[in-house]
Amino acid sequence: IVRQVEHLQQMVAEFSTFARLPVLDLAPDRLPPILDEVAQTFQHSHTAIAWTLHLAPDLPELLMDRSGMRHVLVNILSNAAEALKDQAGGAVEVRASHEPALGRVRLEVADNGPGLTAEERSRVFEPYFSRKKGGTGLGLTIVKSIVTDHHGVVRVRSNHPRGTVLVVDLPAPQGKPAA
């Protein structure tokens, strides 16, 4: 009964967060410091996982909400860590690149966990869909909402030979990168 109550409390808390996501304040900002901060947090808190961060040197400033983007990254990295729980040789690679011709910055988070089935990949952003025992299924729904509010797109694909890759494409100003 105690576990069920705790689970319900967690679900209510996440639903409340989802239901009242703040309006984003998009302003020019740099993605690398946020990526570095969140990645370091996970490196220190999940030491059994090998975390790598690859940032392209030409990442431009983006119109983004710093708090919202931090929330996106924490949710994605939390899912990757959960997928690798109790797995020997677990690794997560975070990559950020700039594609000026397409006017976007691409963020990829790849893990070498058990991966998702095709059906799971098609449902992963649906509210209340979760493979995690005790999961609420709102983490990636929140990610999708925040990314959409940034005029971006998020999707998931397989990581070969195993694992999952979450891809976030964000609009980037065309022209020269910020100094």
Image (tube, helix red, strand yellow):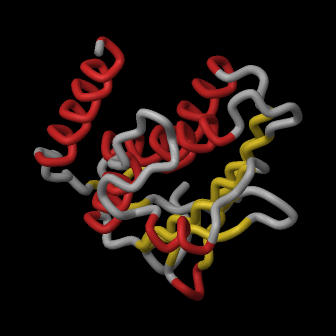
Give the quarter of the figure containing the N terminus.
Answer: top left
- Above/below status of 12 relative to 164: above
- Residue 28 left/right relative to 156: left
Q: 178 or 41, which is in the foreground?
A: 41
Q: Residue pushed farthest top?
A: 2
Image quarter for residue 170? bottom left
Give the quarter of the figure containing the C terminus.
Answer: bottom right
Q: Residue at x 58, y 24 (%)?
A: 41
Q: Total number of numbered labels?
A: 0
The image position of residue 130, as x and y in percent, is: 44, 50
- Above/below status of 153 relative to 166: below
Q: Which residue is drawn at 26% across and 64% down?
A: 149
- Above/below status of 146 relative to 49: below
The image position of residue 119, as x and y in percent, is: 54, 72
Q: Residue at x 66, y 18 (%)?
A: 44
- Residue 155 left/right relative to 47: left
The image position of residue 155, as x and y in percent, is: 51, 70
The image position of residue 5, as x and y in percent, is: 25, 19
Q: 142 or 148, which is in the foreground?
A: 142
- Residue 3 left/right relative to 38: left
Q: Residue pushed farthest bottom?
A: 101
- Above/below status of 37 relative to 45: below
Q: 13 or 75, which is in the foreground?
A: 13
- The answer to whether any part of residue 54 appears in the image is no
Q: Residue at x 72, y 50 (%)?
A: 111
- The answer to whether any part of residue 71 appears in the image is yes
